[in-house]
Amino acid sequence: MLELIDISKAIGGEILANNVSLRLEAGTCNILLGATFSGKTSLMRLMAGLDRPDKGELRFNGKSVIGVPVQQRNIAMVYQQFINYPTHTVFENIASPLRIAKLSNAEVQRRVEEAAALLKISKYIQRLPAELSGGQQQRVALARALVKGADLVLLDEPLANLDYKLREELRVELPSLFQAKGAVLVYATTEPIEALILGGYTAVLHEGRVAQFGKTGEVFKSPCNLIAARAFSDPPLNTASVCLKNNMLVLEGHDDLLRAPAPELVEGNYTIGLRPHHVRLDSRGPGDIELRVKVVINEVTGSESYIHFQLLDQTWVALVHGVQDIVPGNSISCFVDPKEFYYFHPRGEIALLPQSVRVG
Amino acid sequence: MDRIAHRYPGSASTEMDYALQPLSMVWEDGGAYALLGPSGCGKTTLLNIISGLIMPSEGQVFFGDRDVTGLQPQERNIAQVFQFPVVYDTMTVAQNLEFPLKNRGVPVEARKRRVAEVLELLELSEIAGQKARNLDAATKQKISLGRGLVRTDANAVLFDEPLTVIDPALKWQLRAELKRVHLQVGHTMIYVTHDQTEALTFAEKVIVMLEGRVLQAGTPEELFDAPAHTFVGRFIGSPGMNVLTCDVAGDCAFVSGRKVYLRNNYGLAQGSLELGIRPEYVRVLEQVDCPEGLAVSVVKVVDIGRQKILHLLLGEQQLHAILREGTPVPSSPVVLFDPDHLNLYCDSNLLRPPDRGRYP
């Protein structure tokens, strides 16, 4: 188990980690989700002991590892940019941590072959890295991390440079490979979908802080603040400022655009959040509210349409099934169900979850 | 393009050594195209032949009636945007946009007017006077896009993976802006990517490539509904199309020994036969509600929020299905394939039915 207790770190006035506390169990996949510069890599460097925190405590299986050099801890890291020894064969690249640990040739052979088979690179084992595609080279780096049998495995956007389809395959396989070995797996990504597919636990990072940490599905469904909700929405979360008054919910300053019975919340100002797939083109019942909006553009993927429209000063997206023949510039009717709104306080904390989430 | 082909110097002259196999294609003025495929498929080679960075080893390139095969990129009047921002740090945002116009001797009045337009279009007006140096990568890439779009007289604007380095949330915004710009300005645009969502949402026509060959050129809808090749079916869609080995007799297919009715009569189809069905068109039901369904076992359920992706086994064949949000996974599941969306493949190529059978 890896424990971070109130870890902070700043370099040259720039805050990289801000009071971070996390408990990561052995055999689990832990995702650091956040935009570029949200602090994912900085946090991984602190976990590995490559950087020393200004304050806070770092424990592995109960023992402090602050100041313990990375070489003395059993850690494997894989970066976005694949790193291999260019003059060594794939076999020797994977074997390198085992050679350093002075394992017998037979044992090295066995472990390398096992890892190569799991990552589907057995065919290329006698080649040099330069003779492989980018995806294959990254598999070599991952196999080396796997073979090491590390207690802590840090994967920093390991699939970001790979082709989209290859990413899809690998992200399904990766966590189970490392979890089976009982490692604490930490995986950094900018992509919400990647986090959802990987499962496990997710820490949403924002400006060096942990906005929320919990089971991935829980964080997705029950964000505790607007930052976590936004980080976990792809397409981006639709938001608007609303006002609750006299048992009615209205768009701030535009009660003609959106008007609905208020939920059970104290009167006042809130931000609502609505996921794009909950904006529909047809009404599903009397609880739905019609929005008349102007279409900015319509993106069609073949199976789905992403209709971008303007709601006051915000651009909203409706993610709907099928190919929708909608002309930009035209006005259309969209339907939203206030029961599916997230309500946030002006400072961003969650005020009320959608009904389906509350009921569970 | 008339019978264009390319071999890199030093490669042998067998068909397999073509980086780009012989290809003829017409690119319409004002069209939005995407070249989509995995690394090494030849998409960047094709793009470079259009821009003139590569002179094809065979064939001719015409702009209208004019043969430009031997012309340098600057003589072709083409604008390009690359994966990483190309921006002059010491210039302001506006100066960066003005630079390509200055180079081409556009009069100062026209220059200022055009720069203001593009600033407005990309919502960069507020930072027009700032030096580019301290801007983040995404804003710099936006400036790069602006430099590509600023020249009204460009014959075409080419994009080589322009959004690869951009975070997901901003990607949504930039992609939408590009599309909006295309609608407003009407440049011919060609966009290279390995990301299907980018290709499908941006382009009117997507050209899917593999190993130097064009497998299919079609609208997003065509690629989704009737992939011409099993590779296209798998590559487009997330997850891609299910491809199941089968036997066929008349209007029946047999998948893992189970009968599936087809919409068409294929007679006695010969060769290596496969059935293609998209996960979106696989209905998953309880066996008691649908005794005629094909029994499957559930291997894995991946909840990605708005839908669940089911990993199923039908006999010994793997199959993906999609369940909408809120739909429970059946306890003894069976699947039904929507007959309107079943495609039959012979040796990986889409088979057109020999007659319309009993469904005229």
Image (cartoon, rainbow, N blue to C red):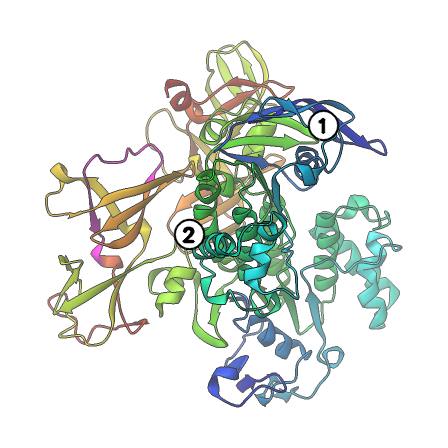
Residue A327 visible at all: no
The residue positioned 42% from the left and 52% from the top of the image is: B238
Circle 2: element type: loop
The residue positioned 21% from the left and 34% from the top of the image is: B331
- What amino acid does circle 1 point to? Ile
Q: Mark 1 falls within which chain? A: A
The residue carrying pointer 2 sits among few (fewer than 14), some (14 to 19) or many (20 or more) residues within 10 Å by Cα, namely some
Q: Is residue A264 above or below residue A314?
A: above
Query: Which residue is more in the foreground, B213 or A152?
Result: A152
Span highlighted in magenta in the image: B323-339
Position of the C terminus of chain A, as image quadrant, is: top left
The residue positioned 27% from the left and 42% from the top of the image is: B298
Residue B230 x/y as whole percent: 35, 66
Residue B284 x/y as whole percent: 24, 43
Specify whether residue B338 is painted magenta.
yes
As drawn, the label of residue B238 is 2
Query: Which residue is more in the foreground, B74 or B267?
Result: B267
Q: Is residue A349 above or below residue A124?
A: above
Question: Can you tell which of label 2 and label 1 is closer to the viewer?
Answer: 1
Circle 1: element type: loop
Q: Is residue A12 above or below residue A356?
A: below
Residue on which the image places disc 1:
A66
